[in-house]
Image: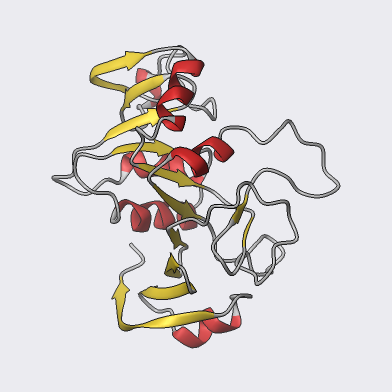
Amino acid sequence: MSETSTTIAKRVARHIEDGEIVNLGIGIPTLVADHLPDGVDVVLQTENGMLGVGPTPAPDDVDPNLVNAGKLPVSELAGASYFASSASFGMIRGGHVDVAILGALQLDGRGRIANWSIPGKPILGVGGAMDLLVGARKVIVATTHLAKDGSAKIVAEASFPLTADRPVDLIVTERATFAVGDQGLTLIDLADGTTVEWVTENTGAPFAVAPELSTEAAA
């Protein structure tokens, strides 16, 4: 993963609270396990059937039987448990996951996410993101602010198929953090060195600016 991805993961980790059950999606979200703040004790869940996921193991400690939903190696914490994928999705659909952290291809001005299909490219299916958007109590998006071609990922109207109608709760990029509410997006945080002007120029959806806008180091 790139330095930008690590930066995003660190910024997302600041929004995880002690005691939460957290599902980490494929891609950037998996890095959050390695950057949880000191004193924050959470239970990480992966939808392929594990509760009690630990940080990324050192190369010499990799167990090929322990992988997350993205097929990347993980470690296990004391008390970890394993179960069928069907039971895992029962947890998700039953509302037993406090926070889901997902990657994104696009987000629209209402905070709805598109993260499963690019028009014109082959797809396998919507995957678990749809269930997480419906079942998790809180959803945080971890994404780069811009796509690889330099276009905005946060747009007024999504051109990619939406994953679910439910808006996410928080959008975290390497540059900014937006809270999502009934009135749309509100900029609540800027990474160190980023200006409101930069965010305005590189965000395709309108947003309000919080009266007490915070500035956090990019890490």
Tell me the quarter of the picture where residue 105 sits: bottom right
Q: Nearer the viewer, residue 200 or 108?
A: 108
Residue at image location 56% in from the left, 39% down from the top: 129
Q: Nearer the viewer, residue 4 or 135?
A: 135
Q: Is residue 12 visible?
A: yes
Q: Nearer the viewer, residue 1 or 21?
A: 21
Q: Is residue 9 left or right of residue 40?
A: right
Residue at image location 34% in from the left, 54% down from the top: 10
Q: Is residue 135 above or below residue 47?
A: below
Residue 20, image x, y percentages = 26, 40
Tell me the quarter of the picture where residue 63 sits: top left
Tell me the quarter of the picture where residue 128 sits: top right
Q: Is residue 58 left or right of residue 103?
A: left
Residue 33, image x, y percentages = 34, 39
Residue at image location 36% in from the left, 35% down from the top: 97
Quadrant location of the C terminus in the rendered image: bottom left
Residue 21, image x, y percentages = 30, 36
